Amino acid sequence: METPRTEDVQHEEAVKTTVVALDQGEESFHALEWALETIRFGASDKVVLIHARTSPASRLSAFGGPGYIVSTDLILNMEKAQEREINEFMDRALQLCEKKQVKAVKLIVYGDARDVISEETKKLHANMLVIGSHGYGAVKRTFLGSVSDYCVHHVECPVVIVKKKPEKKDA
Amino acid sequence: METPRTEDVQHEEAVKTTVVALDQGEESFHALEWALETIRFGASDKVVLIHARTSPASRLSAFGGPGYIVSTDLILNMEKAQEREINEFMDRALQLCEKKQVKAVKLIVYGDARDVISEETKKLHANMLVIGSHGYGAVKRTFLGSVSDYCVHHVECPVVIVKKKPEKKDA
């Protein structure tokens, strides 16, 4: 299936690419903060902020049982609202990179987070993947295991798994 | 059980501590190289090179079946040879840190790698654990899962899982 991208990312050979997976949760934002504080970025290195977006089809199926008639307008409005929220979150992440003087691009891809993150990390020949440990939904995690566990076993580059910032101490 | 340590490590609050797990395998050495190249170390930050050493008791049990009489001298010689090998490997790792001007200490602890690495990482209030994905024995991994998987689920700090350097391209 063709995956629509909001922004195309160049595949450059000499540049070190760090993929940071963002799922709109604070843990994933903390993973980005960790990366920006900890990793040594060269002037031409870049961060790719990736977000795996649930496809409209899979969201529609949630309303698709008998007895539900869903108006197209409602779906379109939900889509728009979700898109706005994602873009706001991703832009906040881009701003943080800019503040830390690290080059960054965003990449939003429809699909299951497991597949999207591991496949895009491979396609980008990334040097590293940074991901929160509990992202992308508690229910799905119970049945399929965490997205981070899946990625550790399906990508070749080093994977950094960042857990939620402990609440007891401020860094 | 009291775990003997070859070198005591100070628990300092302000200093960022990166624990790197080393098991004498090249993958773990590559994990250290990755850390030294990738992470931004401050002047007072330090790396703790940790090695979990099989206890003499558990090695003795390998010979402990009926029909085996093992001389104490043989065991002592094996111990000494193993100790020499571990120290050589750890010194090679220390030298690499010195070359990269990163402060480092070594810490050798008897016990199961899963427990040793996760417990010492907690005790040291480490900011990060760096570990190879396939360390510490293929047979044990089949039954207990990988040491790196265990650590990801048992420590609070970010965990970096580094895989064997791909053979096709030299970095």
Image (spheres, coloured by chain):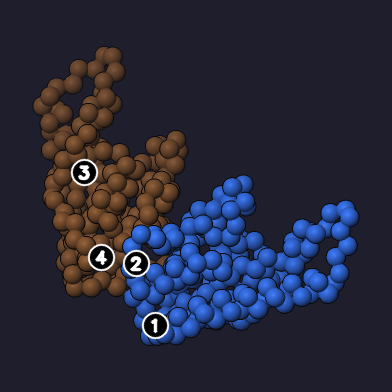
Chain colours: A blue, B brown
Which numbered marker is on residue A100? 1
Up the image or down, A125 lies above or below B143; here it is below
Q: For the residue marked with disc 2, what is the amino acid? A: Asp
Element at badge 1? loop
Viewer can see residue A120: no
Amino acid, disc 1: Lys
Q: CA distance from mark 3 to mark 2?
A: 31 Å
Check contact, mark 1 vs mark 4: CB within 8 A. no
Q: Is disc 2 in contact with disc 4, using a CB cutoff of under 8 Å?
A: no
Q: Nearer the viewer, mark 2 or mark 1?
A: 2
Count neighbours of disc 1 (C-alpha within 10 A) and say few if under 14, some if 14 to 19, many if 20 or more.
few
Q: Quadrant of residue B27?
A: bottom left
Residue B2 lies, with reference to residue B66, above or below; the image says below
Q: Which residue is mark 2?
A: A170
> Badge 4 is on which residue?
B16
Residue B116: give x, y in percent of width and height.
Answer: 28, 44
x, y percent for residue A159? 44, 61
Residue at 75%, 67% in the rendered image: A56
Same subunit, labels 2 and 1: the answer reads: yes
Q: Is A24 left or right of A164, judged from the image as shown?
A: right
Q: Which of the two labelled residues, at mark 4 and mark 3, occupies the earlier sequence position?
A: 4
User: To which residue does mark 3 refer?
Assistant: B109
- Residue closer to the observer: A6 or B66: A6
